[in-house]
Image (cartoon, helix red, strand yellow):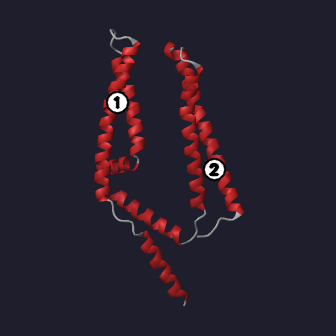
Amino acid sequence: MKLPTPEQEQGHRNATVAGAAKGLFGGLAVALPASFIAHKRWPYYRALPPSLKALGVVTVVVPSFAIAAERAGLAYERSQWHDIGQEELDTVRGREQAKWDTMSSGQKFADFAARHQFSVIGLSWAASVLGAYTWISRDPYQTTLQKIASTRVWAQGLTLGVIIAGAALTHSHRRKAEADHTWLDIIEQEEREKAARK
């Protein structure tokens, strides 16, 4: 394993800080206007203590900050690969793209959902909360607290269904997954290069 040079370490640090800044400002660009709109439109949100409003903003900003920083650092690391490992990654990517091109729409959806299951579960939870609240809020006989409680119950039930479906999808995806033998390809390539040099 080759140790990184000081220039590479500094480049990684710079890329990570730049990614973190993008994530921070992106999260603020979403969370602050959403909080402002909620404050103007809903008296219930207006009545919340500032600490809970700040928690809502932080709940959006911190994950976007951390995820963007990590992705930027990983992207920088990948940009530094220039050897047989990079060739193997390109080969694997080509195989995956060829496999993707032969899939039907249903298979593509199942593959995407299996690879991004937490995003799908999170989005389905948000959609179920929004949909349930939109449907329940039409009831003129329930108070706001009853509507919120009903929304929570419906959202939990719908999310549980999505989690079960995600587990079944992941299980079927794992059974179909092929074994990763990229290490064997790398060894064979290195042996061919050694033989060519002799």
Specify the amino acid type for callout 2: Thr
Asked which secondary structure carries label 1, the reply is helix
> Camera-side residue: 30 or 12?
12
Q: Is residue 181 above or below residue 144?
A: below
Query: Residue 158 in the image: x percent, y percent?
Result: 31, 32
Tell me if 20 is positioned left or right of 159 in this view: right
Picture quarter with the N terminus: bottom right
Tell me if 14 is positioned left or right of 160 in this view: right
Of pointers 2 and 1, the one earlier in the residue sequence: 2
Query: Residue 15 in the image: x percent, y percent?
Result: 65, 52
Q: Is residue 103 above or below residue 84?
A: above
Which residue is painted at 34% across and 34% down in the image? 159
Q: Is residue 104 visible?
A: no
Classed neighbour count for the residue bearing mark 1: other residues with Cα under 10 Å, few (<14), some (14–19), many (≥20): some
> Camera-side residue: 28 or 45?
45
Q: Is residue 122 above or below residue 114?
A: above
Specify the amino acid type for callout 1: Gln
Q: Which residue is denoted by mark 1 in the rendering?
A: 156
Circles 2 and 1: CB distance less than 8 Å?
A: no
Which residue is painted at 28% across and 47% down in the image? 168
Q: Which residue is denoted by mark 2 in the rendering?
A: 16
Name the mark nearer the viewer: 2 or 1: 1
Q: Is residue 119 visible?
A: yes
Q: Quadrant of the rendered structure where residue 153 is?
A: top left
Query: Residue 167 in the image: x percent, y percent?
Result: 31, 46
Picture quarter with the C terminus: bottom right
Classed neighbour count for the residue bearing mark 2: other residues with Cα under 10 Å, few (<14), some (14–19), many (≥20): many
Asked which secondary structure carries label 2, the reply is helix
Which residue is painted at 43% across and 65% down in the image? 92
Query: Residue 17 in the image: x percent, y percent?
Result: 66, 47
